[in-house]
Image (cartoon, rainbow, N blue to C red):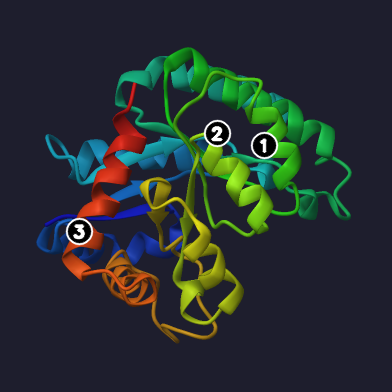
Amino acid sequence: MCFVDSHIHLSDSVYDEYLMLIIGIINNLKIRVYSVSEDLGSSVKNLSIKKKHFVNTDSFKAFVGIHPQYASVKLSESFSDFFISNKESIDGIGEIGIDPTYTINNVSNTVEVQKTVFNQMLSIAEKNNKPVSIHSRRSLKEVLDTLTSYRLNRVVFHWYDGNKSLLKKINELGYYVSFGPYLLYSENKRTLLSESDLSLLLLETDGPVSYRHCFNNVITSPVFIISLINYVSIILKKNFNDLSEMIFRNSVEFLNAK
């Protein structure tokens, strides 16, 4: 049996002193991680981790991209050169999207700049047939409208936080949604989980983000995904092994479908 954490930031500096421990957890517990990036630096670091510690294994999938918090047209140009030089080692594009939260008191980060960078990231994904991990806080409808103008059939809405109507539309388009440990304390998220198309369901930790109401005072680790699968199996009234296998199949399909 193999577990999958479909969204974690292992290139984040928080993990530097724990990286070898986490690599041991991944290998010993057979957890596959999709490690996402936020800017050029973390993208380079993600690939470095993959090449140094996960040669000839499927346990680590490297996603590269520019998060809306770091949106910059100049940065996206440098990113394009980086992608071209490393595209054979890159497994996906992410975390990318639009988020007006990051434009507050920041004159250099506007929604228009975010849209420009987001479209550049989507163009790279479309041209190179790469799956995409989406950040859509406070911009879900706009992100969805943008996505439908591209030929992308492997898209996941990470940390889904929308309503039932948009969830239905996302699933009808064949896009995935991903839920994290907030399911343990959010009744609204548990309701959305129950409304999801289970063939398009992924689970994540989003480490190193911490959780105020669960896993207190512990560095977020890929091992959390096993507890999350167990809890989801209880919510959905499914056998743990069956659910684990389903999530694994979904994750492989998201990564590899043509």
The residues bearing labels 3 and 1 have C-alpha atoms spaced at a distance of 33 Å
Cβ atoms at labels 1 and 2 below 8 Å apart: yes
Which residue, given by chain and number where applicable, does mark 2 sit on?
173
- Of 74 and 201, nearer the camera is 201
> Where residue 216 is drawn, which disc sits there?
none
Category of crowding for the residue at label 3, using alpha-carbon neighbours closer than 10 angstroms: few (below 14), some (14–19), many (at least 20) = many
The residues bearing labels 2 and 3 have C-alpha atoms spaced at a distance of 32 Å
Identified at 25% across, 50% down, the residue is: 248
Q: Is residue 97 left or right of 239 when viewed as pictured?
A: right
Quarter of the image for the C terminus: give it.
Answer: top left
Callout in the foreground (2, 3):
2
Q: Element under label 1?
A: helix
Callout in the foreground (3, 1):
1
Which residue, given by chain and number where applicable, does mark 3 sit on?
26
Q: Amino acid at mark 2?
A: Leu
Identified at 38% across, 62% down, the residue is: 15
Quarter of the image for the N terminus: give it.
Answer: bottom left
- Of 44 and 83, nearer the camera is 83
Identified at 70% across, 46% down, the residue is: 140
Residue 242's spot in the image, x, y percent?
19, 61
Residue 190's spot in the image, x, y percent?
51, 72
Task: Establish if 240 lies above or below 53.
Answer: below
